[in-house]
Image (tube, helix red, strand yellow):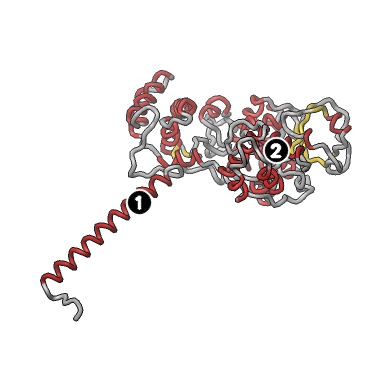
Amino acid sequence: MGLEFGSTITKTLWIFIVVSFISFKTIFIATSLSAVTIFSYAQEVQKTEPVTFQHGTFTQCIARLQQEALNAGVSENTAEDILGQIKPLPKILGYDRNQPEFVQTFTGYFSKRVTSWRVNKGREKLAEHRDFLSKLTQQYGVPAHYLIAFWGLETNFGGIKGKIPTIAALTTLACDQRRSAYFSEELVQALLLLERENLDYKQMIGSWAGAMGHTQFMPTAYMKYAKDGDGDGKVDLWNNELDALASAAHFLQNLGWKTGFRWGREVLLPEGFNYQLAGKSQPQPLSFWSEQQVTQVSGETLGDSDLEAALLIPAGHTGSAFIIYPNFDVILRWNNSEYYGIAVGHLADRITGQDTLSKPLPELPNYTLTEMQQFQDKLNQLGFDVGEADGILGPATRKGVRGFQVTVGLIADGYPSKETVQALMNAPTLEGNKDSQALAEF
C-alpha cells in the first residue's frame, strides 16, 4: 500500500520533507538574488545595498561638500537646507559607467542623430528665430545654422532636456571615486547658480551627469557663459529659447569659433588613395589635399589655401570621408567626440539646404567593449601602440589599426573591419596567440 497521509508518523515525516525543501529553496533563492545584485551593480546599484563612496559614508561626503560650498560663497541656508536633505541616486553610478558611445559605430550614431525630422524641425526653428539669430551672428560670429544644429543634437530642440534632479545627481557623482573632484566643483557651481538666479532646486532637472536646459550646459558653463537673450532680467536655459540660443553663441565664441569658416565638409578620395594620411592628428594645408586629388563631393577642387585641414574616415573606406577645419576642434570642445562633431556639422549643412551624404552609411560590425579591449590588447602585443585598452575606437587605436593593415596588405583606413580582425587573430605574437579564441568570436 502507499503512504497513508492520515497517520501521525507519516504526517510528521511529510512536514519535515516539505519544510526542508522550503528551507533549501529559500537558501537557493537568497543565494541567486545575491548573485544578481553583485552582477548588476555596474549597471545600477541596488537600493537595498549600502553605497560606499570615496570619502566614507554618504553623510560624511555631504559634510565635506557643505564645507566646500560654504568656502565658495554658498549661503549657510542653501548648504544646510538643500544639501542636508539630498539622498544618493544609485542608478546614476550605473549611467556613469555605461556610456553607449564607447562602442557605437559611426553608422549607428549618425543615423540616429541626423534624421529627416531633425533637419525639417531645424529649418522651422531657423525660420522662426531668423531675426534674432542674425543679431547673434553679428554679435558673436557664429552662423545661425550651427546654433540650431547644436540645439537639435543636444535636446531635440528642447524636447528631451532630461528629468533627473540636478543637485542630487551631481551630489551622487561628487561622492563617487571616479570623478569626485570634477563633480564636486560642478555641484558647488550649481548651488551658486541656484542662488544667483533664485531657482527652486526641485525644478533644476537635466541629464544624469548634471547638464541642464535646451543646450545642456553644465553648471560651470551656465555660470560663465549663459546670457539673457530676451532682456527680461533672467537667464533661464530650461524655458527660454532665446536665452538658450544666445548662451550657445556666447559659449562657442569663447571656445574659439573662427568667424567666416566652415566646420569641414564631405569629400571624395581618388582610387589608390593613401589612407595613412588620414587622422585628426595629421593636418595639412588644403593645397596638399588638392595635390592628393581630394575633391569636394561636386568634383570641384578644395583650392590652394594654406588653411590647415585633416581627413577623417569614420566608417572605413566604404563610407564617407570628411575634411575638417579648425572650427571642428571648437565643436569638440563642446563634446569631445568626432562622431558628434561630424553630426553637428552635417546637420547644420542640411538645415541650410545641402544634400545628404554622397555615400550610403555602410553596415558595420558591432563590437562590445570587451571585444574592442581584446582587439587593442592584440595590437599592443604586435607592437602597434594604441595605449590603454579602454574599448574606445579613438585616434590612437585607428592609427594602430592603419599600421597593422599596411603590414598585411589591407586598405589602411583605420577601421577594424571583420577582415582586419580576422587577420589580427591569425597574426602570431611573442606571447603566443592567447586572444585568438576571443577574437574569433567577434
Q: Determine whether, in the image, residue 436 is placed left or right of residue 131.
A: left
Between 27 and 381, which is closer to the camera in this rendering?
381
Image quadrant holding the N terminus, namely bottom left
Q: Which residue is mark 1?
A: 33
Q: Residue at x 70, y 27 (%)?
A: 257
Q: Is residue 137 above or below residue 439?
A: above
Image mark count: 2
Q: Determine whether, in the image, residue 223 is placed left or right of residue 387.
A: left
Q: Horizontal and vertical percent for residue 243? A: 58, 34
Q: Residue at x 16, y 67 (%)?
A: 13
Between 234 and 30, which is closer to the camera in this rendering?
30
Is residue 101 visible in the rendered image? The answer is no
Q: Which mark is residue 143?
A: none
Q: Which residue is mark 2?
A: 401
Contact check, label 2 and label 1, Cβ < 8 Å = no
Label 2 sits on a secondary structure element that is helix
Residue density around tag 2, few if under 14, some if 14–19, many if 20 or more, within 10 Å:
many
Residue density around tag 1, few if under 14, some if 14–19, many if 20 or more, within 10 Å:
few
Q: How far is the residue under mark 2 from the one under mark 1?
A: 42 Å
Res. 385 image quadrant: top right
Q: Earlier in the sequence, mark 2 or mark 1?
A: 1
Residue farthest toward the left in the current orientation of the protein: 8
Label 1 sits on a secondary structure element that is helix
Please state which of the two labelled residues, at mark 2 or mark 1, is closer to the viewer. Answer: 2
